[in-house]
Image (cartoon, rainbow, N blue to C red):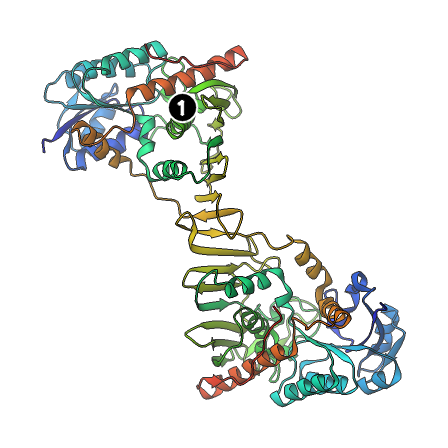
Amino acid sequence: MTELRVALVGLDHWYAALPLADGARSRAGLSLAGVWDADPARAAYVGQRYDVGRVEADWRALVDDPGIDAVLSFVSPDLNPEVCVAAAKAGKHIIANKPLALRSEDASRVVEAVRGSGVTFLPAESRQRLGPNAQWLRRWLQDGRIGQLTSAAMTTWAGLPAQWPDDRTPGWFVDPARTVGGGWVDHSIYQIDLLRWLLGEEVVAISGQTAKHAHPELEVEDYGAATATFAGGAVATLENTWTAPDGGFQSSYTVVGSGGAVRMDGIQGRLLVSGEVEPFSGWVEVAPPGRHDQAADLDHWAAVIRGESDPVATVEDAWHNLAACIAFYESVNAGRTISPREDPA
Amino acid sequence: MSPLRIGVLGAGMIATGGGGVLPNLDPIRHKAEVVAIADVVPDLARTVAETFGIPHAFTNLGAMLDGVELDAVVNLTPIPVHGATCAEILAAGKHLATEKPLATSMEDADRICELAAEHELTVVCAPFNMLYPDRAEARRLVREGAIGKVAFARVRSSHGGPASGAWPADPTWFYQKGSGPLFDMGVYGIHEITGILGPAKRVVAFAGITEPTRTVRGGPFQGKTIDVTADDNVLMLLDFGESTFAVVDGTFNVNAARGPKLEIYGREGTINLSGRPFGGDGPPLEIFRLDAVGGLRGWIAPDMPDGDAPMRRLVGLHRAVLVDHLADCVATGTRPLLNLEHARHVLEIMLKADEAARTGQAQELTTTFSLPT
């Protein structure tokens, strides 16, 4: 098996980039062949930590290098499309930060570059689909355990993100010139991706509001609540914040169907289902399927690249996820429900 | 129907305390009316009678049985005289509700059973845990095979002992030979696990004195040092036959616990009773099944039949539950759930646990019982 030589371009979203860098270095069939970041000190740190011999001063040196097979793009969304387009044109497979871009037009350029290029594109927010919890939930729904999915309530309470492990300031995460929004989009994009995948439908309408409850000094919101309607009529509420105190992180959901429901209590880590539980009625607490090993996502990516597996998600997913998020912010500004753009073309 | 005419024997704490019988009869006045009270402590019965508006007061049981028309007697005497007084009540042709234990010897217990049968009288004996909906539901689930063949159960039956808190009276007697936590607390766990699983066949136990003295930690006797002469730390292992076992404690050493009140482990699942509302968190009953839903193992917290109302009512009656159950059984002619044969079986287990602890030998049990379904 030919080794896949991976370059890490950008460390802005280090929460994802560092585990994947570690995975690229350590998993069979992969090697971490180079790293770049706008901050040379961060790039040097990663080079040393993960034993990467090549630390570049210009990301193009990695993307244009025929010796590099694939790129992990974890630059902020303002630069993400440029890296992805260049990588696709250079025939590099891609895992890309979320959101894909600041604007749908920029995201469309990535879609256009990826289509027909033969490269495999895995959106960062879609990697969750590979985790045991999402896989279990999808199978539970596909087996008809809760009937037709009709609604969902999803919430994440988080603190402000840190721009680097030892720098608690939020940096680009709160810079409207570099990202789409604040506390809402940071986590809602995962929920939108998950529901699109579970339903096999697009968001057709979205509305909501944002606020600055805990951090009025920010230029982006630290609180957002959306109501999203999917093509088949399912409705989801998505409440996501950066207002949690230290230690207060929790991510929970309730998914309701015509014949039952699933509830994940993120505080206690309890997974509960209701439905056909004869001879009893009510909720059943079942063991959560397990922890998501982020680095293991690389195995799927590599298998797709080798033609051994179908992709769990594509660049079009990244585009639609972004379109729904952009529509949310348009709705907040316009004070009415917005329909996301339907197509990258 | 006119209310059951009740005589109360014993005017101490279980009669008059906040959780006792007399202060909690209001909700069942239509079923039971206390017409007399007796106590051997001079003037005590008269004082209590005045406080609770009881028409007649006596200084001994015989005088009460002879002196007033009664349908039933509620026996709230100290443990050592339960046997003799219960027999006397039944011999006089009165229905009986008695505090636990039924007696302290099998001879007394057998005599009580004979008298009840001979006179066709109804006898109700504490503890009353099997009236609680969660215990009843656990019994039903086990019998229906909801957790498969039962392998074993753990039963927490104890508290820290009356000296560990603010007991309102002198708690010394609890720690003296002839009393102790086996009879005081172990009786609850034995009652409920045999109520749920059925009669046991053998018992083995360890027993000892944890420390030679206890210091009362609160209440009017705070600071008093008690010489402990009764075993205050007893662990029993019950054998129900066919490799079904249970461990039950009867100890004054459970100052706090986070474990379940009672947990039963079967081949197909587990039943957990949290102990709520008497401590314990979470639903009163949960059941784990290897095949809970869609082939997945999981915990279910089934709704109790009729919701919380039956439990709230029982809790609200405190120890007047005994009178309530007796009155219902007499009025309807139904066999008590808190029945005499069960109480005798529980007593035999306690007596033989003591013997097993002394001899180091498992003891065969000879009594049995059945509960109304």
Q: From what the image shows, is residue A218 above or below residue B363?
A: above
Front residue of this view, candidates A34 and B54 = B54
Looking at the image, residue A244 sits to the left or right of residue A19; the answer is right
**Which quadrant of the figure has residue A340?**
top left
* Residue B128 % position (x, y): 65, 69
Residue sitting at x 18%, y 32%: A308
Residue sitting at x 74%, y 64%: B18
Looking at the image, residue A172 sits to the left or right of residue B33; the answer is left
Helix or strand or loop: what does disc 1 sit on? loop
Looking at the image, residue B18 sits to the left or right of residue B158; the answer is right
Q: From what the image shows, is residue B100 above or below residue A226?
A: below
Q: Amino acid at mark 1?
A: Glu
* Residue A72 % position (x, y): 23, 24
Residue ID for mark 1: A201
Asked if residue B181 can be seen in this view, the reply is: yes
* Residue B238 % position (x, y): 48, 76
**Which quadrant of the figure has residue A298?**
top left
